[in-house]
Amino acid sequence: CRKKAKMLSLAIKKRSRVPGVMITQTVEQLPPGKSTPDFTRKPIAVTVQEGKKTFFKAMVSGEPAPTVTWGRNKGEIDDPEKYKTRYDERAREHILEIININPDQADTYKCFATNEYGKAVCTTTLNVIAGDQQEPQDFRSMLKKTKKQLPPQKEGEIDPKLWELLISAPKKDYEKICLEFGVTDFRWMLKRLNQMKKERADEQAKQLENVKQIEVKPNGKAEFGFDMQLWDPNSAVNLYKDGVMVPYADDENSKHSLRKKGTNYIFSIKDPQPEDAGFYQVDVEEANVLTTDFRVPAVEFVDKIKDAKAVESEDAVFQCVLSTPLNRITWSREDSSLEHGDKYEITVSEDKLTHTLRVKDCEIADKGAYYAIAGIASSRASLMVEDTKDDAKKFQVNRPEIKHRIFDSPPSFIVPLKRRTAPQGYECYMSCAIKGDPAPRVTWYWNNISLNTNTNYHITNVCGVCSLLILRVGPKDNGEYKVAIQNKLGTAESSMMLNVRGIHKV
């Protein structure tokens, strides 16, 4: 019993890296891979007008994931008409929403993060401005009346809470807020407020510039970089993933590394895996300077990009087909990403599966390796560009007998249809790759019934990749699907069977 009582009374105080957070560890020793709760971002104090609503937001860490609860010093928060709590999975924020605020809700609020190994707690403050004063007059008329009557306001006489409230309030509420604080020189107030907003923006720009999202490079590393000027060169720069500190080195062969050149910092993740996905942040000492998200979609290349060849001034095309629809993928050369513009045309099919890069007006400098990167999967191909001047010289030296070349070819399948099994109620995508000159006419059939004019099926044909998409597969979609291609030199067919899972036969 004494041993049990000792375990229950065990409370080891720990220091959080976030100021104002108190951590209590309730076990003598943490198991490997486990941690006590902590706050990666605590809720900030707010000042709000009566009748409005506001939010407290917090981000926590710990293994296992902590349970987050809220409280206040002078009352309960169990009234759903006044308080609502929720978790935003995308932003990873725990939120307390306070609705239709009354003056009696002004209080010190607490946020608790708890798991089986301990508890973390932090406090924040809600200030409420009473809304029982008379509605202010028209703002323009107030400016006219106060222009000659009132002396310039001295900044030292202003409550700092006024600026905190004005910076986040809409312009239509400025005059009412100012009257609440006894400020009637509106011209001076607007000038000072704009100056403060500019100062804050400039200060933020000094702290962090040119932030880039995490992206996988052709070298196989996931990287994100930013420019930062440190006041103290000896300041500790820490990297966190989902609130847990990640050790790193300056060796590029390490799993996590940091390269620094002047004011530019680049963090790298070697050989990224699905488990590396998460919410990353960079702190200098105890101040957060960067947060970014690394997502790893479950996607593979059904058809990778292939080597291309072009003559100068012609266009070259790279194309790939994915296993999962994505809005965009990364196209790159060596270590530089390519963007849609005058030189490169990047397009995506309607079903988001076929992605195409067109290199316009090819030059000799465009030859080399090109990469398509989707999630952590990549595909590489080369572009060869022929010099038209060299070809002309060769043609002048060796004048062979001119023969008419015939490029016409009958239709054929490069990649035929394949047998598919799809769960009932889900999407089903089937595709094939064809060739032929002239370009073949394509017709899809289901059990020998033409589907080309059936609006229940989404049919596309982009650069020889023919696809059919069924948005919600049902029992009626079972059967044989066939693609028939035809040009003036012949015809060809490819077929497959679709089996829909979840159909119970009686």
Image: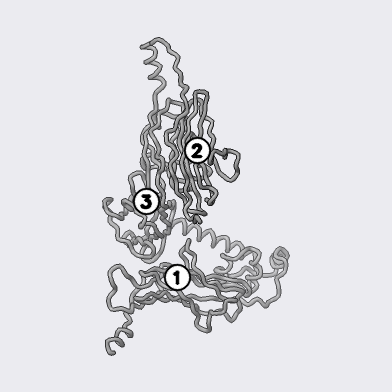
* Residue with the mark numbered 1: 42
The quadrant the N terminus occupies is: bottom left
For disc 3, the neighbor class at 10 Å (few under 14, some 14 to 19, many from 20) is many
Estimate the spatial distance between the alpha carbons at disc 1 and disc 2, rounded to whole Å: 59 Å
Quick one: SS at disc 2? Answer: strand
Tell which circle, 1 or 2, labels the residue nearer the N-terminal end: 1
* Residue with the mark numbered 2: 482
Tag 2: amino acid: Lys
Tag 3: amino acid: Glu
- Most extreme residue toward the bottom is 1
* Residue with the mark numbered 3: 223
Judge from the rendering whether residue 148 lies leftward or rightward of residue 502; answer left or right: right
Q: Comparing marks 1 and 2, which lies closer to the viewer?
A: 2
Relative depth, front residue between 464 and 189: 464
Tell which circle, 3 or 1, labels the residue nearer the N-terminal end: 1
Which corner quadrant of the image does residue 400 belong to?
A: top left
Q: Residue at x 57, y 60 (%)?
A: 194
